[in-house]
Image (cartoon, rainbow, N blue to C red):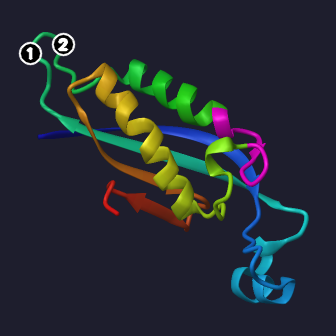
Amino acid sequence: MIYISRQEHFNAAHKLHNPKWSDERNKEVFGPCANTNWHGHNYDLIVTVKGRPDPETGFVIDLKELSTLIRTHVIDQVDHKNLNLDVPFMAGQLASTENLVVAFWKILQPEIEAISPARLHSLKLYETPRNFVEYFGEE
């Protein structure tokens, strides 16, 4: 089995805020991420697919096609957006990196299967250089 990855980048704003809690509780739990006026991140998304190389191309997946798919279905939807207000697939959810990566999986998995016999293996989403989430589609 071969694992191949593509990295994409986007910028987005959000705030962590549970509407069931008081402002004080939100600040206690989420700290500066509960800022009333939002805050932003420079995110990096790494999409890893797995499969066997095609005997004619030697590719598990055409990385140009994978990049276009990721940009069209995910990056263009979130780049320079407010995740809490501007992104329909995040409506009604806390805009945490954990929830975001699960939403990305739900979008990308069927799109990848439509263009290739390769399968989505994992998503790694960096919120900062030191904070990231990795997801393997398991709930």
Q: Which quadrant does the C terminus fall into? A: bottom left
Q: CA distance from mark 1 to mark 2?
A: 6 Å
Q: Which residue is mark 2?
A: 57
- Residue 27 appears at what percent x and percent y? 80, 84
Is 95 left or right of 121, judged from the image as shown? Answer: right
Q: Residue at x 17, y 34 (%)?
A: 51
Q: Residue at x 33, y 54 (%)?
A: 137
- Residue 10 appears at what percent x and percent y? 64, 41
Inspect the magenta stretch and tell me whether residue 85 lies in it.
Answer: yes
Question: What label does residue 55 carry, if any?
Answer: 1
What element does badge 1 sit on?
A: loop
- The quarter holding residue 117 reads top left
Is 72 left or right of 102, judged from the image as shown? Answer: right
Report the span colored magenta.
Answer: 77-86
Q: Residue at x 64, y 60 (%)?
A: 93
Q: Residues within 10 Å of mark 2 (few under 14, many from 20)?
A: few
Inspect the magenta stretch and tell me whether residue 93 lies in it.
Answer: no
Residue 46 visible in the current orientation = no
Query: Which amino acid type is marked by label 2?
Result: Thr
- The quarter holding residue 57 reads top left
Q: Relative to 42, is 25 above or below?
A: below
Is 21 left or right of 126, judged from the image as shown? Answer: right
Q: How many marks?
A: 2
Find the residue positioned furthest to the right: 37
Most frequent secondary structure within the magenta stretch: loop
Is 61 left or right of 124, judged from the image as shown? Answer: left
Residue 12 visible in the current orientation = yes
In the image shown, does 124 or 113 lie closer to the viewer?
113
Q: Relative to 85, is 135 above or below?
A: below
What element does badge 2 sit on?
A: loop
